Amino acid sequence: MNADDLRERFMAAAGVAGSGEDCPPPDQIWDAVSDEQSDARFGKILDHVVSCPACAIAWRLARDFGARERSPAAAASPRIAVWRRWGVPAAVAACLLVVAGLAAQWWWTEGEHTGAIRMPQDEVIRSLVSEQTPCARSEVWLRWSPIGADTTRYTVRVLSEDLKLLHSASLLERPEYHVPEPVFAGLAPGARVLWQVDATLVDGHRRTSGTFLVRIE
Amino acid sequence: MPEDAGQGPAEGADEIEELRRRLHASVSRVCPRWLAGQVDDIVQVAVLRVLDACRNRGGIGKVASSYLQKAAYSAAVDEIRRHSRRREVSIEDEPEMSLPPSRITGPEQRCSASEIARGIRECLAGLGVSRRHAVTLYLQGYTVPEIGRALAYGLTKAEHLVYRGLTNLRECLATKGLAP
């Protein structure tokens, strides 16, 4: 099997269905392709691509969309700069520091990987509402997977298909929200409504969900 | 208590239409063929995200084109994952998506291709880290100099890793009895 065959077969592998729940957010894949991720994160995402056909497509798509690695100039690349430091025998002290740093990072990421430490910034807000089953107008409950601790507060935005903001609610303490029926007054039966969640973590960081759909009866 | 709001976006219809046109062109250009039916949905989600960003950046004109690309990309990836979760991308679609139709024609060949693809992933996972990363990038379409830059290796080392890694990959596939 020559290299071109292998490449084609690997690309074909990307067509098989299946993406894990632990896929990195698209932004992280984009940043990895653009050389804007740390070594550890880059390697972790690349390893994920090996096992995840959907993310292999996402990686290729990032290149097609125009995410390109930065200039090869060594000074401009933090990744290269770090590795060069490793290669300078005289910089023993620096190496020790780097080793200590890497050990700490390994411990940290290993903890993440095994689930022992799960940082909120790696969590993704997922919809818990079916996009296929229409909801009665009086029973539109938006539910999503919580992130962070109980102190996280959520903002929900509800929009029509033509992107008009229909409703928003802030400072929600629970990962669910009942949309008042009058919000849907102007919508035709069977209309699709878009919704999105912002989570504000206790440290002030914000995470925004993808855009979800709900169908209205 | 939650606070409610009901105002729409401040951007003009013309600006939004222009934004939609730009995003549509961008998405249509790179979207896999099997996702062509979802291009409008992807664009719609991307428009929404850009408008969201506009609220903080002072208008559509202030949003960098790189941000538009990234928003379109994120929306496309979300759709790909949704597709995958629904298992709508069947093995039947594989040849259309990424292989020339002439290379894989019948169900038997498709099954074999799928088995080889799975074998490649398993074998890749068994390589050492450096070789695995180098070969994965190679299989993703990177050239050796690009791999060197991405992994911060010199050209010679990158070349060696790809060469040795591909050899290991072939050996591993052979032990599984997988060859086209």
Image (tube, helix red, strand yellow):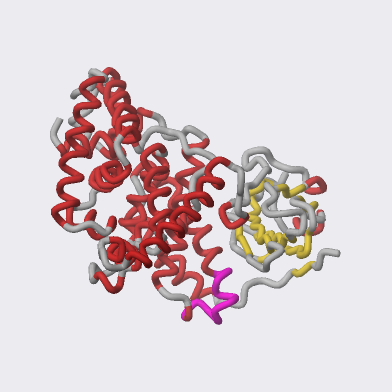
Q: Residue at x 81, y 54 (%)?
A: A181
**Quarter of the image with the C terminus of chain A in it:** top right
Closer to us: A193 or A78: A78
Looking at the picture, does residue A180 appear above or below residue B139? Answer: below
> Which secondary structure class fits the magenta region best?
helix
Q: Residue at x 44, y 52 (%)?
A: B76
Q: Residue at x 50, y 75 (%)?
A: B14
Looking at the picture, does residue B54 appear above or below residue A96? Answer: below
Looking at the picture, does residue A173 appear above or below residue B132? Answer: below
Pinpoint residue A116: horizontal percent, then vertical percent. Answer: 61, 43
**Residue B142 in the figure: left or right of residue A61:** left
**Residue A168 in the figure: left or right of residue B42:** right
Q: Residue furthest right?
A: B1
**Residue B138 in the figure: left or right of residue A65:** left
Pinpoint residue A106: horizontal percent, then vertical percent. Answer: 47, 50
Closer to us: A180 or A84: A84
Q: Which residues are magenta?
A: B51-61
Q: Residue at x 36, y 36 (%)?
A: A15
**Quarter of the image with the N terminus of chain A in it:** top left
Q: Is residue B59 magenta?
A: yes
